[in-house]
Image (cartoon, coloured by chain):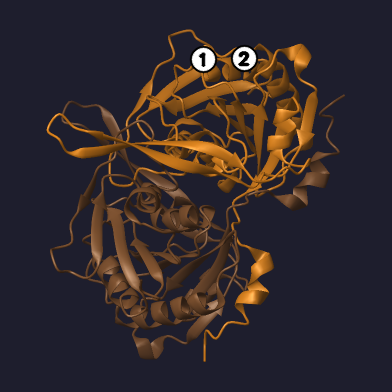
Chain colours: A brown, B orange
Amino acid sequence: MSKKPLILVTNDDGITAPGILALIEVMETLGDVVVVAPDSPQSGMGHAITINNTLHLDKVSKKGEKTLKYSCSGTPADCVKIAVNEVLDRKPDLCVSGINHGSNSSINVIYSGTMSAAIEAGIEGIPAIGFSNLNYNWEANFEASKKYVKRITKNALKHGIAEGVILNVNIPDLEEKDIKGIKVCRQARANWKEKFDKRKTPQGKDYYWLTGKFVNYDNGSDTDEWALKEGYVSVVPVQFDLTAHHYMQQLNTWQLND
Amino acid sequence: MSKKPLILVTNDDGITAPGILALIEVMETLGDVVVVAPDSPQSGMGHAITINNTLHLDKVSKKGEKTLKYSCSGTPADCVKIAVNEVLDRKPDLCVSGINHGSNSSINVIYSGTMSAAIEAGIEGIPAIGFSNLNYNWEANFEASKKYVKRITKNALKHGIAEGVILNVNIPDLEEKDIKGIKVCRQARANWKEKFDKRKTPQGKDYYWLTGKFVNYDNGSDTDEWALKEGYVSVVPVQFDLTAHHYMQQLNTWQLND
């Protein structure tokens, strides 16, 4: 039995994405690694799970390769569920998701497949971190990211992460020398102003592509958007208790039982 | 111009589900109603959005029908986005989602397409409520639900809902005389213990169905699970700021910048 931590790696860009390869490379220096990741890109899948369809799981690591790798036909949240139940022989010590190609800062956490995998692990009581790099390109450079992924993961393994909390880490698209450090932040108040690109099928019927513009309403210097703009890596602790506790008293003044 | 509130109705079970028909019936007594709902069931879709595929929108209400109805090929969150941007000529005064066939209490809020539609509306600054009935069957009886849907919606229209808060309403599967009233609650700490049903394809390859058992770890009498078990309608105020504010101080004691 190895005493190294058992680390589950997943993502939402699919098991062949350069971002997950960078993440696996770092994790192999920190523990025993098992990869269960989607067989195709799953961006924007939010916390979707597959309940009306079958799931397929394929071992894709080669004979002799030290890290076991599986591709799964499901969503990022499915990957964590099937890894814990059908692949791993014990509960992992950590689950890391990413490195996502593109930001999951502020409101993007809600739409993010990367973060849904990490949050699913958190729900199952596994310490978890989602990592994202602000560069959307498949050719993004992950060299600087790897340094920060390693530092944050080492801290998480050393200190532990409280139950019910998951870390959402975003890394600016900068060279290592230009990254100023790491900041613990809150989620900025921001959203997407959608624009639907309306087109016509060859048969003349309307259809749409969803596009949009990110709008930040929150210039607080304690937010992830501020930190990233200033050249810091942002770390937002995230929870899955969605209760707006501050609003319960107000709701109790309504005439709900009169 | 009508002075009645403009109410957007959506769901995740699809536009033909009995639950949305019950919801439309109630909303037509309270305002001008427009329906934009998925053209097929979208349960378990979480906060998925469609970014790698096209969206199709079809008017399905008949000539002369007072309520405009559109079916959309996308997810519940897509339905809200396309309704606001391409269907409605002004921002709606309220968005209601449901009535879901099945519970969205406690941790189910994370996986719920019904609630993702309501949360999407909340993100866009529209007061929003998701309604669910604990009966999973297509033949569920919505008579008692309609009474509570109406009472809660009237309160929301009268008092307004604070920005950043969405209501998650669950209704027990009981006859009207057996429902004890409405309780404002917090989300119970609960999760699903997955079990994968492993089968073989006709060609002998393994595949899986995701199944599971709901486990409640939280017997607090201020939780939604408690209220529902006791025969109350539960109302949980939900937020999309996922920041675990209570954990930021702890994270700042880590060696993140040493």
Q: Residue furthest front?
A: A1
Count of number-bearing discs: 2
Residues flagged by tags 2 and 1 on a common chain: yes
Q: Looking at the rendered structure, which numbered label has been put on residue B142?
A: 2
**A30 over B12 or under it: above or below:** below
State the image coordinates of residue B86 (x, y, percent, origin top left): 43, 35
Q: Evaluate whether residue A221 shows in this view.
A: no
Mark 2, other Cα within 10 Å: few <14 / some 14–19 / many ≥20: many
Residue A109 lies left or right of residue A244; in this view the side is: left
State the image coordinates of residue A139 (x, y, percent, origin top left): 22, 70
State the image coordinates of residue A84 (x, y, percent, origin top left): 40, 53
State the image coordinates of residue B100 (x, y, percent, origin top left): 54, 26
Q: Hey, what amino acid is under mark 2? A: Phe
Of residues A98 and B127, the one drawn nearer to the viewer in this rendering: A98
Which residue appears at 32% of the width and 71% of the height? A23
Of residues A244 and B223, the one drawn nearer to the viewer in this rendering: B223
Q: Earlier in the sequence, mark 2 or mark 1?
A: 1
- Residue at the disc numbered 1: B18
Q: Are marks 2 and 1 in contact (CB under 8 Å)?
A: yes
Check the residue under mark 2 and report the chain it is in.
B
| The N terminus of chain B - image quarter | top right
SS label for mark 1 = helix
**A167 over B229 or under it: above or below:** below
SS label for mark 2 = loop
**B205 over B152 or under it: above or below:** below
Residue A246 lies left or right of residue B12; in this view the side is: right
Which residue appears at 67% of the width and 15% of the height? B29
> Which picture quadrant has residue A67?
bottom left
Q: CA distance from mark 2 to mark 1?
A: 8 Å
Q: Evaluate whether residue B16 shows in this view.
A: yes
Q: Hey, what amino acid is under mark 1? A: Pro
Q: Residue furthest top?
A: B64
